[in-house]
Image (cartoon, rainbow, N blue to C red):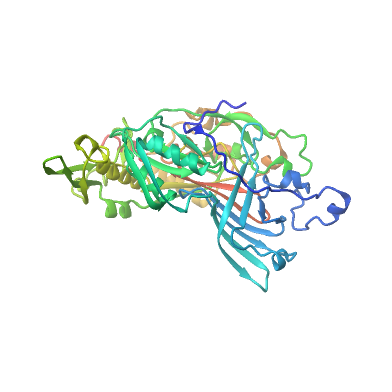
């Protein structure tokens, strides 16, 4: 077993039912004669080996699609509720007599690389739209996770209690699970869902969740049907910590010929890296890019926001005002760049926004909402928006089921080799004062465990990467991030890969500028 702990833990388990999914025989003599020629020559033709690991298992009604029929898949966990996009080619004319109609679903199965410690992903999706081309018999499907009752309108009241407990009640009604990194919130009140959907009720309720001034909340449905209610601020820290997992091959051994005797996984630290020695594994970063939306965020939200409302008391009312300055990680002020404009300018102090929130009558004054109801709207919204200012997008070489949304994990990025772009990046780091005093990857702390022993499969060794001796650590991009989004993508002929959107609230100060 891996030495691995989730910070977002299960509180109640899901009871939701999914459709039965099956795999046809492809191992008998007759079945092998029909094996698709589109499968790469290095891929094992056993369906039990390939499905879910090398390629997604996609089924619509009783129609299961083979490797040559699935053109593209995108399974996204970026939104509150997971979505699926699939493009297929109906070579056998399945839809000529069994075209999906109202109520039909798309079934998805993905198998984890570390089957002994991880659960497979098995979800059903309501079909939102279908586009087709009759001439090419190609179809594209867009779906959203099927949760019966989530989108129906209901009129329901919830007796006085906290958000934490009310959301659990909703999860039990929907037969989905509930998970959190909290155990309690300080926002007890009576709530009502007045002929609205549970989805809207969940969104509006968690938008007004309050624990204390150092907490802000978000929610999402994970790929195992748990509603995760997360105190996001708890996921940010300056602590150096890594988790021990079973690192697996990016291309599963089960999808390769002649690899039956190779070691499929080995224990090591969950550190995402583009270090050459980790090529071919599911912690290896094949590509990465930075995205910056800072001006768009402060233009719409300011660097801080004032909220105003009338507090209704028993015999009077008074105007109240409070502001939210987005939270930062304690201790980051001296060693990191805070995203509050240029270090030598004070524009952030005057670039503010205002929000009129109406009236508030709290329980303590004979009303019906908790004391921080209006303030929590600003606290949660302003801090969540701040997270999307600057993000790092990374593409992994394979699937890694240990990674989940709002997980905190370390990233170790190197530049090196003989390419022009890599040499440019090294020059940029030197110019910013980010030179690596110790270019030896083994000497990097707290990331020195990234070089733990690895499987010796030939496919892992054959990745086209630069000489490790020429690699240079990028001090600016390396560090701890929080996972803001996850996508699984399949492009024929495969395999399935994983992309992450990584969040960082503070960025390292280049060494030459620390004294300024």
| Closer to the camera in the image, 287 or 483 | 483
- Front residue of 211 and 344: 211
Q: Nearer the viewer, residue 510 or 217?
A: 217
Name the quadrant of the C terminus.
Answer: top left
Q: Up-down: is 112 above or below 76?
A: above
Point out residue 12 in the picture as x, y percentages from the top left corner.
Answer: 51, 33
Q: Residue at x 51, y 48 (%)?
A: 77
Regarding residue 231, the answer to whether it shows in the image is: no
Note whether 304 is above or below 65 in the view shown: above
x and y percentages locating residue 386 in the rendered image: 33, 46
Residue 88 lies, in percent from the top left, at 65, 61
> In the displayed structure, does residue 86 sit left or right of residue 375?
right
Q: Is residue 475 left or right of residue 116?
A: left
Residue 333 in the figure: left or right of residue 280: left
Residue at coordinates 64% horizontally, 45% vertically from top-left? 110
The residue nearer to you, when weighing 405 against 312, is: 312
Residue 386 shows in the view: yes
Q: Quadrant of residue 231?
A: top left
Question: Residue at 17% of width from left, 43% of height from top?
Answer: 311
Report the residue that reaches farthest toward the bottom: 135
Q: Report the quarter where the N terminus lies.
A: top right
């Amino acid at each position: 077993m891996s030495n691995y702990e989730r910070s977002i833990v299960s509180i109640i388990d899901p009871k939701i039912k999914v459709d039965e999914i099956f795999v046809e025989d492809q191992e008998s003599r007759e079945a092998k004669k029909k094996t698709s020629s589109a499968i790469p020559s290095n891929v094992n033709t056993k369906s039990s080996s390939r499905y879910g690991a090398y390629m997604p298992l996609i089924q619509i009604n009783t129609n299961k699609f083979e490797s040559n029929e699935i053109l593209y898949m995108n399974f996204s966990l970026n939104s509150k509720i997971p979505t699926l996009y699939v493009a297929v080619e109906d070579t056998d004319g399945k839809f000529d007599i069994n075209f999906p109609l109202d109520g039909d679903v798309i079934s998805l199965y993905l198998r984890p690389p570390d089957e002994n410690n991880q659960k497979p992903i098995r979800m059903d999706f309501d079909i939102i739209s279908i586009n087709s081309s009759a001439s090419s018999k190609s179809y594209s499907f867009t779906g959203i996770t099927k949760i019966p009752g989530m989108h129906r309108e209901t009129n329901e009241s919830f007796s006085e209690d906290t958000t934490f407990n009310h959301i659990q009640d909703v999860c039990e009604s929907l037969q989905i699970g509930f998970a959190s990194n909290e155990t309690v919130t300080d926002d007890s009140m009576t709530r009502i869902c007045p002929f609205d959907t549970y989805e809207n009720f969940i969104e509006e309720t968690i938008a007004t969740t309050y624990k204390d001034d150092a907490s802000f909340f978000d929610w999402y449905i994970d790929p195992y049907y748990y509603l995760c209610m997360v105190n996001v601020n708890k996921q940010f820290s300056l602590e150096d910590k890594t988790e021990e997992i079973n690192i697996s091959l990016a291309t599963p051994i089960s999808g390769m010929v002649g690899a039956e005797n190779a070691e499929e996984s080995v224990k090591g630290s969950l550190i995402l890296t583009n270090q050459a020695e980790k090529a071919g594994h599911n912690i290896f970063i094949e590509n990465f890019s930075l995205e910056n939306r800072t001006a768009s965020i402060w233009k719409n939200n300011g660097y801080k926001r004032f909220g105003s409302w009338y507090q209704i008391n028993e015999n009077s009312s008074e105007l109240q005002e409070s502001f939210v300055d987005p939270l930062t990680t304690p201790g980051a002020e001296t060693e990191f760049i805070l995203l509050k404009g240029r270090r030598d300018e004070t524009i952030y102090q005057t670039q503010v926004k205002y929000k009129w929130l109406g009236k508030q009558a709290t329980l303590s004054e004979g009303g019906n909402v908790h004391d921080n109801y209006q303030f929590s709207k600003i606290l949660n919204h302003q801090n969540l928006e701040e997270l999307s200012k600057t993000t790092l997008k990374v593409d992994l070489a394979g699937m890694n089921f240990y990674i989940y949304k709002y997980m905190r994990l370390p990233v170790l990025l190197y530049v090196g080799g003989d390419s022009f772009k890599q040499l440019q990046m090294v020059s940029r780091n030197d110019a910013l004062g980010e030179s690596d005093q110790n270019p030896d990857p083994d000497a990097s702390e707290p990331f020195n465990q990234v070089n733990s022993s690895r499987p010796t499969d030939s496919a892992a060794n054959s990745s086209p990467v630069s000489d490790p001796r020429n690699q240079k650590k990028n001090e600016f991009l390396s560090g701890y991030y929080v996972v803001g989004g996850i996508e699984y993508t399949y492009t024929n002929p495969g395999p399935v890969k994983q992309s992450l959107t990584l969040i960082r609230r503070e960025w390292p100060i280049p060494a030459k500028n620390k004294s300024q």
